[in-house]
Amino acid sequence: MSVENFIDTNIFISQLERLDIRKATIAEELIRQGIANKTACISFQIVQECLNTALRKAQIQLSESEMRSYLQSVLGPLLSVQPSIQLYNSALDIRLRYPFSFYDSLIIAVALEAGCTCLYSEDMQDGQQIRGLTIQNPFT
């Protein structure tokens, strides 16, 4: 499997909360294009983080039924990478080489496994390149 972009949790939260309209609009477009053109993906980790944040931590929380709808229409179509021992080992290797947390290393490992060239994230170093993957903050 090879897709162009990996989308981090914070992009979905910006879209859902709509606290910053500029960010929400950018996030909406990235997600919409990724689904429509099949050029983006996410992993199990992103689904879990997004559901947990939207249901419990977000400034504007969603109901269970709203999250189920979002899961079906947005997260589900993008979900393409599942966990494996190889994936966890790759994340550990990335963590040893770069100054990322384990969870950020796991996101990078998944993006690399999926063949992505761009990782959209607001939380990682914009412009950093790792083995052909470029981290890009779409809000800058």
Image (cartoon, rainbow, N blue to C red):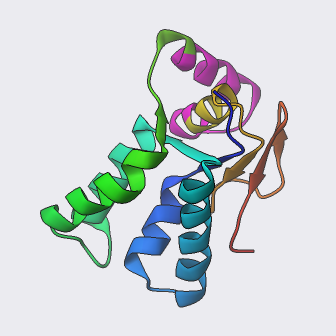
> Residue 97 lies in magenta, yes or no?
yes
Quadrant housing the N terminus: top right
Residue shown at 70%/67% (left/top)?
138
User: In the image, is residue 71 above or below residue 101?
Assistant: below
Which is nearer the eye, 93 or 112?
112
Going by the picture, which residue comes out furthest to the top?
Answer: 85
Position of 120 with respect to 46 (left or right) is: right
In this view, the residue in front, 49 or 78, is 78
Count how many numbered circles sit on residues in the image.
0
Instruction: Please state the horizontal and vertical placement of residue 37, each as a whole percent of the image.
Output: 63, 54
Q: Residue furthest bottom?
A: 21
Quadrant hosting residue 19: bottom left
Magenta span: predominant SS is helix
Residue at 65% across, 25% down: 113
Quarter holding the C terminus is bottom right
In the rendering, at what x and y percent does residue 61 appear? 24, 73
Part of the protein shown in magenta: 87-106
Position of residue 7 in the picture relative to residue 136 (left or right): left
Horizontal side of 120 relative to 77 (left or right) equals right
Q: Residue at x 63, y 57 (%)?
A: 121
Can you give x and y, in whole percent of width and height, for residue 109 in the image? 63, 29
The residue positioned farthest toward the front in the image shown: 36
From this view, report whether residue 85 is shown above or below residue 25. above
Q: Is residue 104 above or below residue 24?
A: above
Provide residue 82's location: percent of width, then percent of height: 44, 26
Q: Is residue 112 magenta?
A: no
Looking at the image, residue 119 sits to the left or right of residue 56; the answer is right
